[in-house]
Image: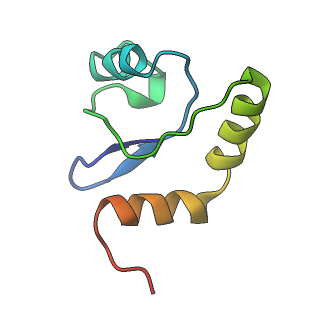
Amino acid sequence: MLISDDIPKIKTYVGYTNNLKKRLKLHNTNKGAKSTKGRKWKIIFKKKFTDKSIAMKYEYFLKNNYPLRKVIKLKYLNVKIS
């Protein structure tokens, strides 16, 4: 999961890759996914899988689980969760 803490709207992005450094570089040079263009991104959560299909299932789960994404984002931003 990536975060772009541009003011005023902090955004997150979820995706899978087999080369995290290369993918992050693409996003930060406006050559990644359309929704990532024009922002600078930082990695705030990563999970390693040995099987691509399991990785893609987890990506789908995380993309659609907004409460979990919010917890990860708030943890990164050092906001207390009550």
Which of 22 and 28 lies nearest the eye of the viewer? 22
Q: Is residue 18 left or right of residue 52?
A: left
Whether residue 51 is situated above or below residue 64 in the rendered picture: above
Q: Is residue 60 left or right of residue 30?
A: right
As rendered, which of 71 and 49 lies closer to the eye?
49
Q: Position of residue 16 (x, y in %)?
A: 58, 27
Q: Is residue 28 left or right of residue 81?
A: left
| 11 left or right, relative to 68 | left
Q: Which residue shows up at 46% across the image and 23% down it?
A: 34
In the image, residue 28 lies at what x, y percent?
A: 28, 22
User: Given the current orientation, which residue lies at the most extreme bottom position?
Assistant: 82
x 72%, y 22%: residue: 52
| Quarter assignment of residue 79 | bottom left
Residue 80, image x and y in percent?
35, 79
Q: Residue at x 27, y 15 (%)?
A: 29
Residue at 49% over, 66% down: 71
| Image quadrant occupied by the C terminus | bottom left
Q: Quadrant of residue 26?
A: top left
Give coordinates of residue 59: x percent, y percent. 66, 37
| 23 over 59 or under it: above or below | above
Q: Which quadrant of the view contains residue 51? A: top right
Nearer the observer, 36 or 18: 18
